[in-house]
Image (cartoon, rainbow, N blue to C red):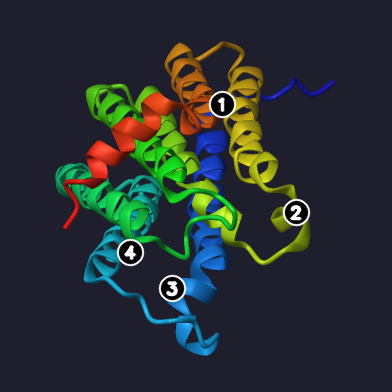
Amino acid sequence: MAMEQPFDWRQYDRRLFAAASIVFPVVLLLGFARTYYLRFAFDAPPIPRTLVHVHGALMTAWVVFFVAQVWFIRTKNHKTHMKLGIGGVALAAAMIVVGFFTATASAKYGSPSTPPGVVPMEFLVVPLVDLVVFAGLFGAAIYYRKSPADHKRLMLLTAINFLPPGIARIPFEPFISGGILIFFGIPTVLALGLVAFDTWKNGKLNKVLLVGALFLVASYPLRIMLSGTGAWMTFATWLTSWSA
């Protein structure tokens, strides 16, 4: 009887991240095609603020950065991966700053990105918490940069964190009618599923991945609970008073 081959966790990692490097940009492209990337083909209304274009360019650069980093590791180009990572820190900082001002300006002046029937000031909690979660996950990924198993799983969570805006905009009826259950539910399933699958495949729980996934998932109900409170509305009004 042939002996069972040991599980090759490196091959599992390569396949997982290769899949993520494809799914991540595809979801965002599907979601933002009509309103941003291919808006010229859908007779979409003009984008009123330059800041939105800057935000879009930075987010697009982050997707390209994520995909490039995955493939540099896959092709064993570790030196380029590490050098590009330094630029990734600067890119992340720019995304957070520009994302903050884009979100507050959208809440103050209105934006097509705000779901119908939702008060812009209430919705502001969603993109702002996105930025906080991204900063926490990416900061942790930088901290664990010398621990590849932890670093790359945290980076995968940063990608999952950016999926809801794309999912919410995909013109597919189950997604549209499902609303919050879909655009928060799918990332929740992905994050917790990743923890479960990773534990099963590796035979042990990655505690850093677990904490990161719980941090991300817990942020979803927190946004919902905060959005309609008087304390949040006061805070949101104060924040938007700084928007130009």
The residues bearing labels 2 and 1 have C-alpha atoms spaced at a distance of 19 Å
Quadrant into which the C terminus falls? bottom left
Q: Residues within 10 Å of mark 4 (few under 14, many from 20)?
A: some
Q: Which numbered disc flags the more N-terminal residue, 2 or 1?
A: 2
Mark 2 vs mark 4: give the one in front. Answer: 2
| Residue lying at 49% horizontally and 43% vertically, measured from the top left | 17
Residue 140 vs residue 99, the one in the foreground: 99
Give the quadrant of residue 36.
Answer: bottom left
The residues bearing labels 4 and 1 have C-alpha atoms spaced at a distance of 26 Å
Mark 1 = which residue? 221
Q: Which numbered disc flags the more N-terminal residue, 4 or 1?
A: 4
Residue 113 vs residue 236, the one in the foreground: 236
Give the quadrant of residue 130.
Answer: top left
Residue 184 image offset from top left, x and y in percent: 60, 39
**In the rendered view, does 187 fall on the left or right side of 35?**
right
Mark 3 = which residue? 36
Mark 4 = which residue? 56
Badge 4 element:
helix
Residue 205 vs residue 213, the one in the foreground: 213
Q: Which numbered disc flags the more N-terminal residue, 3 or 1?
A: 3
| Residue lying at 62% horizontally and 62% vertically, measured from the top left | 170
The residues bearing labels 2 and 4 have C-alpha atoms spaced at a distance of 26 Å
The answer to whether 153 is drawn above or below residue 29 in the figure is above
Mark 3 vs mark 1: give the one in front. Answer: 1
Q: Are marks 3 and 1 in contact (CB under 8 Å)?
A: no
